[in-house]
Amino acid sequence: MATGTGRPWWALPFPSPPPSFTADPPEEFLCPISGSLMADPVVVPPGQTFERACIQACAALAFSPPAVAADLAAPVSSSTPLVLVPNVALRTAILNWCDRLGLPHPAPLSPGTAHDIVRRLMPPQREDQSSKSQRPQVASSVRVRRQSVGFVQEPSPNQRGDALEEEIMAVLGAEGATPAEQASAMASLRQATRKNKEVSRQLCTPRLLAALRPMLLSADAGVQVNAAAAVVNLSLEPENKVRIVRSGAVSPLVDVLRGGHPEARDHAAGAMYSLAVEDENRAAIGVLGAIPPLLELFAGAAGAAGYRARREAGMALYHVSLSVMNRSKIARAPGAVRTLLAAAEARDRSNEADAAALRRLAVMILANLAGCPDGRAALMDCGAVAAVVRLMLNGSAAPGSAEEEYCISTLYGMSRGSMRFRGLARAAGVEAALQPVAEGDGGVGRDMARRTLRAMREEDDDAPVTATGLLGRQWDDGSVVSEGLVSIRRPPHRSNYAGPSGSNTTQF
């Protein structure tokens, strides 16, 4: 049967993550001093833009970091005030970027936090003068070295990774480290793992992963958000995926999904998606309780979840549902099937492309659930037969589309060995939906449609099938499944899970 792409049904590629997803802000949106998204950008002579609180802290401490061209070393007086011009255009661009991705708007830094950031950039003797006890200078040497290219030889990735790990561990292991210091350490880790794959692989050590776990549970939003984003970046390297799960990171990620800061929650969903791509991780993710909060996020019930976060949660659920034991967990989760059916039928005229992506994910997961007895029972209990038929008849699953193939496979799964399906199928009008497919030119979809109709009509199902039809594969309950359906359920191996921007969908 045609797929609308010129390729046969069984050659459909595994759906790639949406290219529009990104949580990595453009460089110009970040304050050169704090490295964070600017909430109140201001322009200072000779034309540089900074977060207002950061540049005011520099002036108050009479310190000019390497990133600041203006001379702030002399104390500011009333006769020579520091001129700060709001960068309205940049602030508007930042807010639009956040709205487009469904992210919360950045909050202005408090004066105390800004002073802490600037003090960490000051030489030790200057820091002593600020009456603050000395703390490890988190990644300051790396930051200054990066800003002073030409004066210091750039370290190798191995040297950079070793040095950064020691600096971060010095802060996280220091007694009485402040949230601002922890946030700075996590921001340094996030930046390093975003820009260099080799450093990301080197930093994925048991010691650093163990130190990351409490940072994911921090009550400070800056610490939690940067820690969750760092986990995503670390998880993008294939060899890191199993290490992260074995380190015990899944449980704190589940806690973030349940009640973390909105931006951290979105990163946690992305981390689950990335980790669930690895076969070995799926059972652990299901056992450790990720399914209910992922379902909640996919449904859009977890606060103001945007389409990006819902897609990440949906892709995580799809990969998790590839594990046989997780299909029963999803089917038995309260409200799970109703959530998936609602998403499969949802419409959003203001954003139809994103709504269609969520519909497709929902039907993909439903097709997986139809492959186990618990899933079939839950689907029929919640009216899935009628819902899937509606999708096929109202055009949501267009003829020849991948969505139609997933719908057919869902109906086919529910028909296997179930007398209950027959009455539900007749009442829902399955024949009207499947007959055109069954009379088509051929392919796996046609054979599944024919067998589903035979099951509904209580006809003998021993008729021969074509070479392109059912090839003797077994579902987990012993029923036959087509090669095409197996291709949905088992994505091809990917040596590099990174998308065009270098991650599942992007780096954080």
Image (cartoon, grey):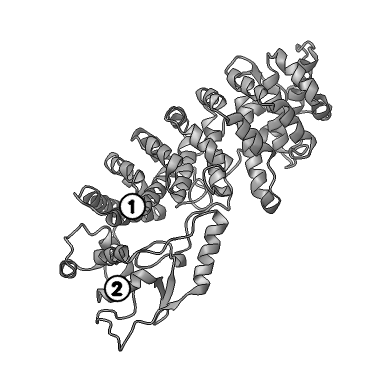
- Could you say where residue 235 lies in the image, as x and y percent from the top left? 42, 43
- Could you say where residue 162 lies in the image, as x and y percent from the top left? 26, 50
Measured in 3D between alpha carbons, the distance from the residue under mark 2 to the one under mark 1, in whole angstroms, is 22 Å
In this view, the residue in front, 203 or 62, is: 62
In this view, the residue in front, 134 or 157, is: 134
- Could you say where residue 102 lies in the image, as x and y percent from the top left? 54, 53
What residue is disc 2 on? 58
What residue is disc 1 on? 186
Left or right of residue 201, residue 60 in this image: left
Q: Quadrant of residue 13?
A: top right
Q: Residues within 10 Å of mark 1 (few under 14, many from 20)?
A: many
N-terminal of the pair, mark 2 or mark 1, is 2
Q: Residues within 10 Å of mark 2 (few under 14, many from 20)?
A: many
SS assignment at label 2:
helix
In this view, the residue in front, 216 or 304, is: 304
Q: Does residue 335 lie above or below 113 as drawn?
A: above
Q: Quadrant of residue 123?
A: bottom left
- The dot on residue 349 is none
- Could you say where residue 396 lies in the image, as x and y percent from the top left? 74, 40
